[in-house]
């Protein structure tokens, strides 16, 4: 299931899948989450102190197995106020604490007191979270580009995306694009604006689907653009 397949928001799609389709629905949700977030979570582990705990793939896979197997895990996210990506990073940190407790118990270093407190101080590491955000933002920008391009192509306006791509991604001036496409520079600029509007709309939809509040979208987009270029 790709982001472009969502008929409404991601949260609604997840809720519908879990409520209606049983095991198949849960599998679809799990596949979707792992497709979007496995790589950014691995980037977090590799840039954080968690890399000394376990291999990034093993730690992230263990997190997915323990959390996504819980029938209430995604429902709890939906009742929270967190964007999905921050919910998943917090879950990864909790999984790491549990993993440390398991290792200490296996080695005899833990008295198995049954206490609920963590055996190690594991908190969000800002520099590692920035690496997570960079990986996630680049994937999201790619999805937004794909959505905008598909929408324009469906409407018979694929040339608008071509101009947008050449100008913003390849750095070609509108005058040169106009010469290549046999249109004026002004027409090239107009087509690019149409594509830019579709791209921003797709990006705002994907962020809203991910759980970002409407009032925070502008700030989130500004941060996403900044961190993706680092």
Image (spheres, rainbow, N blue to C red):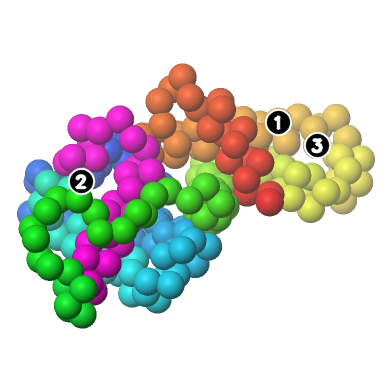
**Disc 1 versus disc 3: nearer the observer:** 1
Residue under numbered circle 3: 188
Circle 1 or circle 2, nearest the eye: 2
Callout 1: SS = helix
Residue 207: image tag: none
Name the residue that disc number 2 marks. Answer: 74
Mark 1–mark 3 distance (CA, rounded to whole Å): 9 Å
Instruction: Assess disc 3: are there few (<14), some (14-19) or many (≥20) residues with their C-alpha within 10 Å of its C-alpha.
Output: many
Give the camera-side residue of 212 and 158: 212
Residue 47, x across and y down, in percent: 53, 62
Circle 3 sits in a helix, a strand or a loop, which is it? helix
Which residue sits at x=79%, y=45%?
167
> How far is disc 1 from disc 2 in space, using C-alphas?
38 Å
Q: Does 112 appear above or below 54?
A: above
Q: Quadrant of residue 111?
A: bottom left
Which of the two residues, 59 or 138, is positioned nearer the viewer here? 59
Rendering coords of residue 126 (x, y %) = 52, 47
* Horizontal and vertical percent position of residue 80: 25, 33
The stretch in magenta equals 75-104
Q: Which residue is mark 1?
A: 193
């Amino acid at each position: 299931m790709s982001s472009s397949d969502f008929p409404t928001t991601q949260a609604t799609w997840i809720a519908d899948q879990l409520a209606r389709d049983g095991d198949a629905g849960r599998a679809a949700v799990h596949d979707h989450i792992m497709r979007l977030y496995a790589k950014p979570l691995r980037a977090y582990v590799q840039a954080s102190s968690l890399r000394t705990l376990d291999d990034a793939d093993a730690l992230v896979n263990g997190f997915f197995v323990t959390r996504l197997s819980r029938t209430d895990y995604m429902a709890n996210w939906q009742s929270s106020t967190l964007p999905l990506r921050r919910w998943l990073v917090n879950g990864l940190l909790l999984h790491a604490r549990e993993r440390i407790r398991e290792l200490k118990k296996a080695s005899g270093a833990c008295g198995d007191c049954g206490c609920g407190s963590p055996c190690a101080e594991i908190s969000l590491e800002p520099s590692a979270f920035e690496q997570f955000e960079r990986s996630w933002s680049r994937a999201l920008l790619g999805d937004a580009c794909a959505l905008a391009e598909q929408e324009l192509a469906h409407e018979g306006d694929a040339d608008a995306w071509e101009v947008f791509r050449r100008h913003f991604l390849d750095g070609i001036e509108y005058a040169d694009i106009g010469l290549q496409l046999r249109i004026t520079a002004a027409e090239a600029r107009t087509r690019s604006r149409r594509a830019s509007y579709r791209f921003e709309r797709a990006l705002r939809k994907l962020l809203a689907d991910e759980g970002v509040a409407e009032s925070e979208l502008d700030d989130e987009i500004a941060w996403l653009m900044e961190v993706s270029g680092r």
